[in-house]
Image (spheres, rainbow, N blue to C red):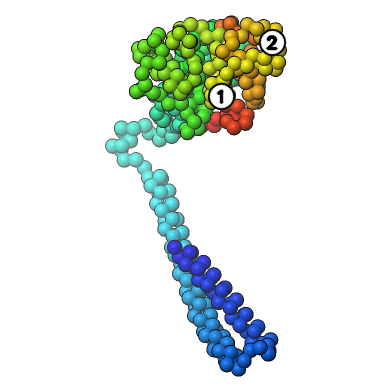
Amino acid sequence: MGSERLFNINRHHSIKLLALASTVMLLTTGCSSVSDSENKKLTEQVQELQSENTSLKAQLAILKDSFAQRKIGELKTALAGTDKIAFENKSVESPDIASATSSKLAPPTPSTNLTSATGAQEQANPVAKTFSDLGDCPNKDLIDDLARLHVFDDLGADFKPYQPITRAQYVTWLYKAYNAIQPGQRQLHLAPQAGQQFKDVSPSHPAYKYIQALAFTGYSIGYLDGTFRPDKPLTREEMIGIKVALDSGKDLPPYRSQMECVWKFSDSKQVDERFTGYVHQDFYISGPKGNNIQRAFGKIAAFHPKQAVLRNEAAATLWQEGQFGFNGPITAGSVTNI
């Protein structure tokens, strides 16, 4: 408040000085158009301005001194508080307290704001999950990045990278990875009040809440007969359909001609019509490790759309969320809150 008043006095002082200078200039030019009465009036104004200017200078000096003293006082208070904290930190625990605690102060536990399986922000386990069976797995680095974000905390000691992944497991990982990577306003939310979305996924299923969450956002992740088939192995075309819908933020219509034009897979005709738009769109998703198909399968001449997706391939698609353009790519490797 004091600094604002000081600024206003300074500004007012400058305006008055400008008015005084203008008036003096008018008097000293000897302009013939100024009459004696006007000249007398201008002289009186000059005297009045000079008096007010002197008063403003005095006010400014007082305010400057007051402002400086206040700042010095605040600085002293802050320094005194720092000294008090330093003194308290050096004090020794009493025998009673020491007997109930360790003789050494435990280091602060690292914390991270990751969205948990319940959709609420909570402190995650600071120890990243490690797996004993990744070995020379081509996607080991991507899996490690996601593990540091606690996407795989529910797994055991083995990742089983070369086993097929089920549709329910992929949606579970997708939900966790997406919410760990994306900022809060773009995260997925559970929908506990929503009715059962698929007739074959009951509330007792372990992945029920994750499947419900993705379905409730409006993405077409199930089959046309109203089933989800949670325990069925996920196929390549299904994975791209689910993942690219989330990356682009919308369901996409079929686009076979353009899909065949850009990808030139030898087996493009085998891609189910409903997934052609998603496979086509994935061609334009880019990032430091390529699009979803490239991260999962590398450079391939045939897509094998009906082939089951392996767990390490599925994890590779989760490493990046979003696409260049409006959404922008965000990767697990770029998240630093771990």
Quadrant occupied by the N terminus: bottom left
What residue sits 45% from the left and 56% below the top? Answer: 79
What residue did someone put label 2 on? 265
Quadrant in which residue 98 is drawn: top left
What residue type is disc 1 on? Answer: Asp
Position in image of residue 242 (x %, y %): 53, 17
Asked if residue 151 shows in the view, the reply is no
- In this rendering, the count of numbered labels is 2
The secondary element bearing badge 1 is classed as helix
In the rendered image, the vertical position of residue 337 relative to residue 129, given as above or below? below
Please, which residue is most extreme toward the bottom here? 36
Q: Left or right: 321 with respect to 106?
A: right
Regarding mark 2 in the picture, which secondary structure is present there? loop
| Number of other residues with Cα within 10 Å of mark 2, as a class: few under 14, some 14 to 19, many 20 or more | some
Can residue 217 be seen from the camera position used here?
yes
Q: Position of residue 260 (x, y in %)?
A: 68, 13
Q: Marks 1/2: CA distance?
A: 22 Å
**Residue appearing at x 57%, y 73% in the figure:** 14
Of callouts 1 and 2, the N-terminal one: 1
Report x, y in % for residue 106. 41, 33
Front residue (pair 277, 150):
277
Choose between 111 and 325: the one closer to the eye: 325
Residue farthest to the left? 96
Residue at image point 40% right, 35% down:
105
- Give whichever of 184, 32 is nearer the camera: 32
Kindly identify which residue carries mark 1.
Answer: 247
Indicate the quadrant where residue 109 lies: top left
Residue plotted at (46% across, 26% down):
188
Mark 1 closeness class: few <14, some 14–19, many ≥20 residues within 10 Å: many
Residue 255's disc is none
